[in-house]
Image: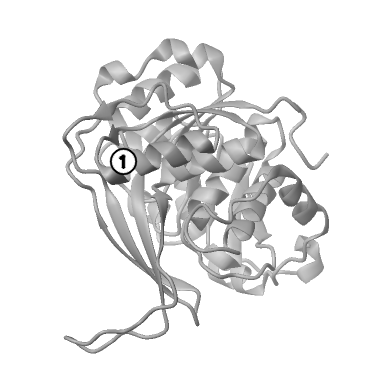
Amino acid sequence: MTGPADTAGPRILVVGYNAFDVIVPVQDFPEPDEKAEVSRVITGGGGPGATASLAMARLGAAVKLITPLTDDLPGRLQRRELLAGGVDLSLSPTMVGFESAKAVILVDEARAQRTIFWSRGNVPVLEPRHAMLEILDEVDLLYTDGHEAEVSLRLARAARERGLPVVMDAGSVRAGSGELVACCTDVVSSRGFAPSLTGFSSPLDALRALRDMGPTRVAMTFGSKGVLGLDNDIPLPVPSFAVPVKDTTGAGDAFHAGYAFALAGGLEFRTCLDWGSAVAGLKCRDWGGRRGLPYLQEVLRLIENGPRNSPTDLLAMIQIPDPAGPTAFG
């Protein structure tokens, strides 16, 4: 089986961050006090939790998002984009009179790399009352990007008690990250999160320490090189798919969305990592965090027939020998 078994789509509750992105592809940077013309400027919604919500809705999930929205222009545009994408915002309060979070993302077209300048705005954090525990009775999985720590923690504890999977997009260590990790079943770390939280620089050691904090399944992403999972203490390196890359903005959000969608559909760990890689790879074909997000059939085709990048760089980064050769990970 290559796709989630429930054709109706899983029901997923997301808690997290939203922002408004301005993406500027650049060829080179001008000198101070000079100008440079660019080919285009792309605007759209961003933020890990909000982008993952849209990604999962596009795959066919019924998604409810808890995030603080604003009534300024970027906030209204965010609301419109998420609603048009099928995300349920009935649990997301509108903070009147506040300035929304924004990011300016400079994309180096030649290297397909990005530099991000961002502002959190002045939106207040959600209050404990926004963690309505009864909503967990209506979902198959809880997803958090680590923002809105108090609401995420209350929901994660209750979801774990109910036996629900709880997925964490572990991008950066924040106040409360350790407590939240302990309440999650699945933690997918960025290259920096697990080492920063655990104090272990080795990816494998950091993942083992992360797992010992409470999650059942842990993994670490390495961008275009792939992802390392830890399956019953056995390293599970999964190379990325070989796809054209235009812009990596939002690729991590897309990876976590694909992983969570597959997990909510009952798929096994390795397959969930494949789903994350496929959704992230396809996202990179277009500018911004959301324009390239794939639909279900596109992901299924890539997983079934898509070529893989060589595992050599991934294995070297995580210091694992490849005795069986590259085909072992194809």
Vertical side of 243 occupied by 194: above or below: above
Residue 128 in sight from this viewpoint = yes
**For residue 133, what is the image quadrant?**
top left
Quadrant of the frame with the C terminus: bottom right
- The image position of residue 15, as x and y in percent, is 40, 32
Residue picked out by circle 1: 75
Q: How is the image coloured?
A: one colour
Residue at (35% x, 21% y) in the render: 154
Out of 314 and 256, give the one closest to the viewer: 256
Residue at (28% x, 44% y) in the render: 73
Out of 205 and 57, give the one closest to the viewer: 57
- The image position of residue 261, as x and y in percent, is 62, 37
Residue at (59% x, 22% y) in the render: 140
Out of 150 and 88, give the one closest to the viewer: 88
- The image position of residue 132, as x and y in percent, is 37, 14
Determine crowd level at label 1: few under 14, some 14-19, many 20+ residues with C-alpha closer than 10 A.
many
The kind of residue tagged 1 is: Gly
Residue 135 placement, left or right of 216: left
- The image position of residue 106, as x and y in percent, is 37, 70
Vertical side of 109 occupied by 148: above or below: above
Residue 205 placement, left or right of 313: left
**For residue 26, what is the image quadrant?**
bottom left
Residue 184 placement, left or right of 178: right
**For residue 302, what is the image quadrant?**
bottom right
